[in-house]
Image (tube, helix red, strand yellow):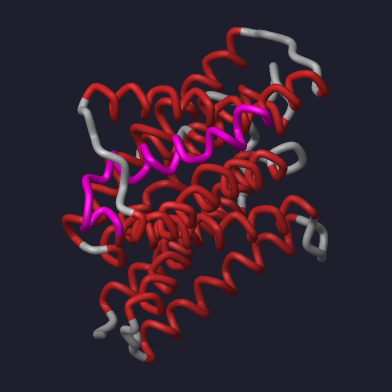
Amino acid sequence: MVAFSLTFPSTVWGLESFGPWSLVAVRSVLAALIAGAFLLAGRVPLPDRRHLPGLAVVAGGVVIGFPLLTTLALRTSTTSHAAVVVGLLPLTTAVLAALRTGRRPSRAFWAAAVAGAAVVLAFTVQQSGGALSAGDLYLFGALLVCAAGYTEGGRLARLMPGWQVIGWALVLCLPLTLPASAAALALEPVRLTAHGVVGLVWVAAGSTFFGLYVWYRGMAAIGIPRASQLQLAQPLLTLVWAVLVLGESLPAAAPLAAVGVLVCIAATQRAKD
C-alpha cells in the first residue's frame, strides 16, 4: 500500500518533465526492462498459451489502462481528489472478483457497495461544482480497467508466481510501449528535472513492478476479495503524501469522503457471503 499510495504524487512529479503519453509509455518500458531482467535471470519459461488472455487483461488494465487514465486525470484533478475517487477501487475489485468467480454477495454487501458509491459520487460532484469533470470520467474508467486487471492477475497468481504475472504482462506490452515511447517523446516536450526523474523511476520500479509483484503474491495467498480490502489504506496515505510531498491544500470534504468509503467497504467484509 505504501508503494501504491505514492503513485499519484510520483505521477504529478513525473508530469513536470514529461507529457502524459510519454510518462505512461516510458514508465511501462522501464518496468518491462526490470521485469525482463528478472525473468531472464530466473530462466523462466514462456507462459502457457492458455494464460495469454488473462495476461492480456492484466496488461490492458494495470500496465496501460490505469496509468494512462489516471495520468490524464491528474492534469486537471488534484492528487487528493483523485485519491478519494480511486478509494472505490477495493470495492470495485471485490465486486468484479465476485462476478468472475460466480459467488453471490449478500444483500448487506450490496447495501454497503451502493453506499460507498454514493459517497464517492457525492464527493466528486461537489468538488466539480455540480457536474462530473473530464478528470472524473478518466478516474472512473481507471477504476474499472484496474479492477479487471487486479481480478485477473489475482487469479493467475494462483497458477504462477505473482512477479511472473506482472513481469510477463509488462514484457508482452513492449511491442506497443516501445514505439509509443519513441512517438510520444518526439511529439511531447521533455524538460528534465529532479522531481520529474524521481517520479518516473518510482512509478516504473516502485508502483508498476515491485508494488504489483507484492500485490499479486498477496492476492494468491489470501484471496482476491480479502486482499482487495487491504487497499483501503491507500487513499488515506495518498492524502498524507499530497500534503507533505506536493504541498496541496486538503479540501475539507476529502478526508471525510475517504473515511466514508473506508467505513462502507469495511462493512462489505463483515457481510456474510
Where residue 133 sits: x, y (%)? 79, 56
Assign the magenta stretch its main secondary structure.
helix
Residue at image point 26% right, 53% down: 157
- Magenta part of the chain: 156-180
- Residue under the image location 80 percent in, 17 percent down: 189
Task: In the rendered view, tell whether residue 13 sits above or below residue 257.
Answer: above
Residue at horizontal 39 percent and vertical 23 percent from the top: 34
Q: Give the quarter of the figure containing the C terminus.
A: bottom left
Q: Residue at x 38, y 69 (%)?
A: 94
Which quadrant would the N terminus be assigned to in this image? Answer: top left
Residue 161 in magenta?
yes
Count of all numbered marks drawn on residues in the image: 0
126 on left or right of 263: right
Q: Quadrant of residue 39?
A: top left
Q: Position of residue 192 (x, y in %)?
A: 68, 8
Task: List the single residue furthest toward the left.
Answer: 221
